[in-house]
Amino acid sequence: MAASDPLTTTVSTKGQVILPKTVRESRRWNAGTRLVVEDTPEGVLLRPAPVFPPTRLDEVAGILPASGPARTIEEMDAAVLREATRRHGRD
């Protein structure tokens, strides 16, 4: 098939459509990939479904209350090292 020839597929009796392999590979749509189907005036649009629901920053930022002054990177690194040493007994 020439590069300019359109890709075609057929709707099965169960309403299934097989996407051409070249399209699946270029989009990295493996078996089990969830797609959003949108009916547009130009035709049907397929997009990968989002992995996570959409959220706003105010929904996720500051979930845990903080008190006291902000910690420095060095203080945070030291705390992580202390906890790793406590859990695993080594550096």
Image (cartoon, rainbow, N blue to C red):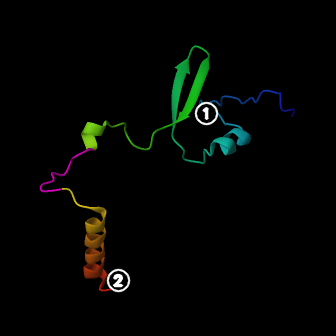
Label 1 element class: loop
Q: Quadrant of residue 58?
A: top left
Q: Is residue 68 magenta?
A: yes
The extreme left residue here reads 67
- The residue beneath circle 2 is 91
From the viewer's perspective, is the residue at label 2 or at label 1 nearer? 2
Point out residue 34 in the picture as x, y percentages from the top left corner: 51, 41
Tell me the amino acid under the disc marked 2: Asp
Query: Magenta stretch?
Result: 61-69
Taking depth in this image into account, of 88 and 35 the one nearest to the observer is 88
Instruction: Out of 58 and 13, give the one closest to the viewer.
Output: 58
Is residue 46 located in the magenta-colored stretch of the structure? no
Q: Residue at x 22, y 46 (%)?
A: 62
Relative height, residue 85 to residue 34 (above, below): below
Q: Which mark is residue 87?
A: none
Horizontal arrangement in the rendering, residue 63 relative to residue 54 (left or right): left
- What's under tag 1, amino acid-wise? Gln
Q: Residue at x 59, y 48 (%)?
A: 31
Q: Quadrant of the C terminus?
A: bottom left
